[in-house]
Amino acid sequence: MSARVALARVRDAAAHAAAHAAAPAWLGADERARWATLAPPRRPAFAASRRLLRELLAQATGVPADLWQVSATAGAAPVATRLGRPGERAPPVSLAHRLEWV
């Protein structure tokens, strides 16, 4: 499996996030818990990064984005698992944020 790199502008996700004070419904329980600890200005970047990660996983594996669960432990790299298949290996993933880019 080849490496994939993508960029998303946080500003593009900010308008949607500002209109919805609650965490996006598609976030997993671990991600919603992390969302609750973030300052409101940081939430759009968090949501944008998680959406982008799922889209990249879908492109790389052919598994729809909504079938991926992603860990959200503070200070640790995210770990992707496929819903309903906890022992199945998923591609390693990584996220980076810089200014208004993910």
Image (spheres, grey):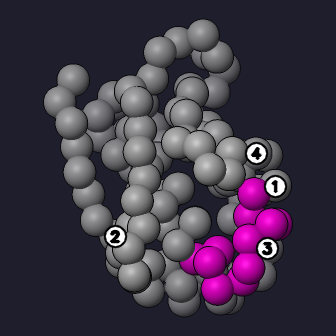
Quote the CA–CA distance across marks 3 and 2. 21 Å
Instruction: Find the magenta span and give its range.
Output: 34-44
From the viewer's perspective, is 36 left or right of 5? right
Q: Secondary structure at mark 2?
A: loop
Judging from the image, what secondary structure is the residue with disc 4 in? helix
| Mark 1 to mark 2 CA distance (whole Å) | 23 Å
Q: Amino acid at mark 1?
A: Ala
Q: Earlier in the sequence, mark 4 or mark 3?
A: 3
Q: Nearer the viewer, residue 74 or 31?
A: 74
Query: Which three-letter amino acid code belongs to the residue tagged 3?
Result: Ala
Rate crowding at label 1 as few (under 14), some (14 to 19) or many (20 or more) other CA atoms within 10 Å. some
- For label 1, the residue is 33
Q: Is residue 92 above or below residue 96?
A: above
Task: Looking at the image, tell me whether mark 3 or mark 1 is earlier in sequence order.
Answer: 3
* Category of crowding for the residue at label 4, using alpha-carbon neighbours closer than 10 angstroms: few (below 14), some (14–19), many (at least 20): few
Q: Identify the image quadrant of residue 59.
A: top left
Task: Return the residue at label 3.
Answer: 22
Residue occupying image coordinates x 53% and y 56%? 50
